Each structure stands twice: as structure tokens, then as C-alpha cells.
């Protein structure tokens, strides 16, 4: 009888690094572009009375024969009210041949890492080649993995960060300066964080736009990572209208990504979008056309990113005999 491997977060962290996750996420976008996967749009359960939700994200990579599902919550009040992370996740990997559960693992760290990697892959393919100045709006866990991934694909000379809480942005700046030996500076306004930057990252939960069009310089690349539900929007719609906008998946982005509000208002149309990031990676469509272009990547997070990453972790766990094995059918 086969057994199921249980992997907790501390074990997973020993098995992969950001460079591994970047490779897996790029593979995920390529397979999505090639239509080699089954991946229904994520389904939501809304816990309105608790201001949270649960998302169910299945995926099957048909040629690679890798399948699994992630369940992930988003509860913004968790840190203050319950001393829990805003985002927590569990991933189950399934043998496509039998349906047997091969692994059950923490998906919280994987979610943070693969979302950071998504930003890194986007910057690799859409930012100007000489990009070296980064601006980040938001200083939560996602901000850390975003800079971690950008540091793998860029030669960063300087980064600036803003969030509403002074201590959070100061801690972020100090921690990341020490970790990567990059001058990371906490600034006192969003405008200062995004003005005259080569790459801008937004990782906030806001419903109303906080990035103004006049603050964004020609040639900037923006990773819009925060919008993950209907009604959320970080960038003024006019920024999207004048930029080359790329998405990860139409079904999800149109429902809950950065483009969802401008689309619903008629400010933006589907034909205004340039296409999917995976199609840029595959060479199906051009990405940046000139050094003056403003490019935007609207990331909603795809199950295929989680499953490719989780399978790498699973294979490494098998190789080095990590994890706790159980028989769920006993």
C-alpha cells in the first residue's frame, strides 16, 4: 500500500530556494501558455462575517503528469485578532493514475514564494535590461519574497519601501539591507516609493487606487500583485490605459485582478490587453517594445504555480527522505 508524505513548513524550507521556485513558476507559465494543463478558475467561499475567504485551486499538468489542489484562505484581520497569518494554505498532490494522495504539505510558504517568483519572472521578461532601482508599496510577507525574487533576476542598486506603519517599513528596510547587502530605504510616502523607479511592486489589500498616474515614469515596469478579489484596485485606471498590460490568466484577472475594476467600468477592454506573460516567455507575443514603454504585470496567482513548485518539493523530499509518512486508508 502506498503512503502519503506529510511535509511541514520547516521541512519545505530546507528543500528549495527562491532560484528553484523561479524555475518552477516560469515552467508553470510556459505550460499554461501551451495549453498543456487543466486549471479551472479558482473558486471562492466567502466568510463575510469574518471578513475572509477560502479559495480552492486545482490543476493537472497533462504532459508532465502532475496533479494537485491548493486550499488557501485570506483573512486580513488574522494578525491583529488571532495572531495568525493573513494567508494560510494546504496543498495536496495526487497521483493522476490512481488518484492516491501522494503528499499533503504546508502551502503557506509556497504561496508566498511562488507569488514572489511570479514578480521575478515578470520583471525578467518585461522590465528594461538595465533596471536597477526598485520601489515597493507594502511591507508584509509578500514584500519580502518580491524583493527576494527580484534580487535573483536584477542587479539591484537601491530599493525604497513604503507602508502605512512606520515600524513595518523601517524593519523591512533594515532586514533586507542586512540580508542582501542592498541599500533599502524606508520612505514616508507612496509617491516617494514609486517615483523614478525602474521596477515598482504593489503588494497591498486596498480597494481604492493608491498609485497615481503622474508618479509613474516612462520605462517603468510595474508588478501589480495586491488585487486578488472583485473590487480591489491599486493603480489608477489611467496608468493601465497608457501601458502595455500583461496578465497571468484572463478568467481570474478579469474577475479579481488589477484589471477587474477598469474592465467593469468600461475604461479598459479585453482587446487593450497585450496578452499573457506565458505567451511572452514562449515568444508568441512581444513584451516590452521600447525603453519608454510602461509595462504592467497583473498577477492573480495560478494553481499551476503552486503545483509545479509543490512537485519539486515532493521529489526532493523523496530523494532525501524528508517528511512523515502515513497511511490514510488504514
Image (spheres, rainbow, N blue to C red):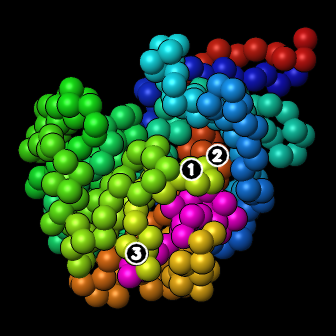
Disc nearest the viewer among 2 and 3 = 3
- Residue under numbered circle 1: 228
Give the class, few, some or many, for how many residues have Cα within 10 Å of label 3's Cα (few <14, many ≥20).
Answer: some
The answer to which of 169 and 20 lies nearer the viewer is 169
State which tag comes first along the sequence, 1 or 2: 1
Q: Quadrant of the C terminus?
A: top right
Q: Earlier in the sequence, mark 3 or mark 1?
A: 1
Give the magenta-colored segment's residue range. 242-262
User: Residue 244: horizontal and vertical position, in percent?
Assistant: 42, 80
Q: Quadrant of residue 215?
A: bottom left
Quadrant position of residue 40: bottom right
- Residue at (76, 47) in percent of width and height: 43
Answer with mark 2 or mark 3, whichever residue precedes in sequence.
Answer: 3
In the displayed structure, 64 sits above or below 237; it is above
Q: Residues within 10 Å of mark 1 (few under 14, many from 20)?
A: many
Please give the residue where the numbered disc 3 appears in the rendered image. Answer: 238
Q: Is residue 95 left or right of residue 321?
A: right
Estimate the spatial distance between the alpha carbons at disc 1 and disc 2, rounded to whole Å: 19 Å
Q: Relative to residue 29, is residue 151 depicted above or below?
A: above
Which residue was labeled with disc 2?
307
Q: CA distance from mark 3 to mark 1?
A: 20 Å
Q: Position of residue 56 (x, y in %)?
A: 73, 41
Amino acid at each position: 500500500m502506498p503512503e502519503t508524505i506529510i511535509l511541514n513548513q520547516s521541512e519545505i524550507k530546507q528543500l528549495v530556494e527562491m532560484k528553484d521556485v523561479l524555475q518552477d513558476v516560469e515552467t508553470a507559465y510556459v505550460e499554461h501558455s501551451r495549453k498543456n494543463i487543466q486549471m479551472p478558475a479558482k473558486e471562492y467561499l466567502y466568510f463575510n462575517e469574518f471578513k475572509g475567504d477560502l479559495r480552492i485551486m486545482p490543476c493537472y499538468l497533462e504532459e508532465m503528469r502532475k496533479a494537485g489542489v491548493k486550499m488557501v484562505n485570506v483573512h486580513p484581520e488574522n494578525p491583529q485578532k488571532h495572531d495568525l497569518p493573513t494567508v494560510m494554505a494546504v496543498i495536496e498532490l495526487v497521483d493522476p493514475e490512481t488518484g492516491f494522495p501522494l503528499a499533503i504539505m504546508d502551502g503557506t510558504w509556497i504561496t508566498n514564494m511562488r507569488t514572489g517568483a511570479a514578480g521575478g519572472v515578470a520583471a525578467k521578461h518585461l522590465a528594461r535590461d538595465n533596471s536597477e532601482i526598485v520601489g515597493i508599496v507594502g511591507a508584509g510577507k509578500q514584500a519580502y519574497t518580491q524583493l527576494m525574487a527580484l534580487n535573483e533576476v536584477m542587479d539591484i542598486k537601491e530599493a525604497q519601501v513604503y507602508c502605512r506603519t512606520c515600524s513595518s517599513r523601517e524593519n523591512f528596510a533594515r532586514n533586507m539591507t542586512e540580508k542582501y547587502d542592498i541599500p533599502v530605504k524606508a520612505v514616508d510616502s507612496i509617491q516617494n516609493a514609486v517615483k523614478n523607479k525602474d521596477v515598482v511592486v504593489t503588494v497591498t489589500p486596498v480597494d481604492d487606487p493608491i498609485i497615481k498616474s503622474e508618479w509613474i515614469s516612462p520605462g517603468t515596469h510595474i508588478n501589480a500583485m495586491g488585487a486578488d478579489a472583485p473590487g480591489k484596485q491599486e493603480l489608477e485606471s489611467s496608468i493601465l490605459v497608457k501601458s502595455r498590460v500583461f496578465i497571468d490568466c484572463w478568467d481570474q484577472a478579469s474577475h479579481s485582478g488589477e484589471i477587474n475594476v477598469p474592465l467593469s467600468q468600461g475604461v479598459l477592454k479585453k482587446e487593450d490587453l497585450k496578452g499573457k506573460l506565458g505567451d511572452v516567455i514562449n515568444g508568441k507575443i512581444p513584451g516590452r517594445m521600447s525603453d519608454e514603454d510602461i509595462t504592467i504585470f497583473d498577477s492573480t496567482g495560478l494553481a499551476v504555480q503552486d503545483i509545479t513548485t509543490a512537485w519539486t518539493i515532493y521529489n526532493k523530499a523523496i530523494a532525501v527522505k524528508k517528511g512523515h509518512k502515513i497511511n490514510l486508508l488504514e
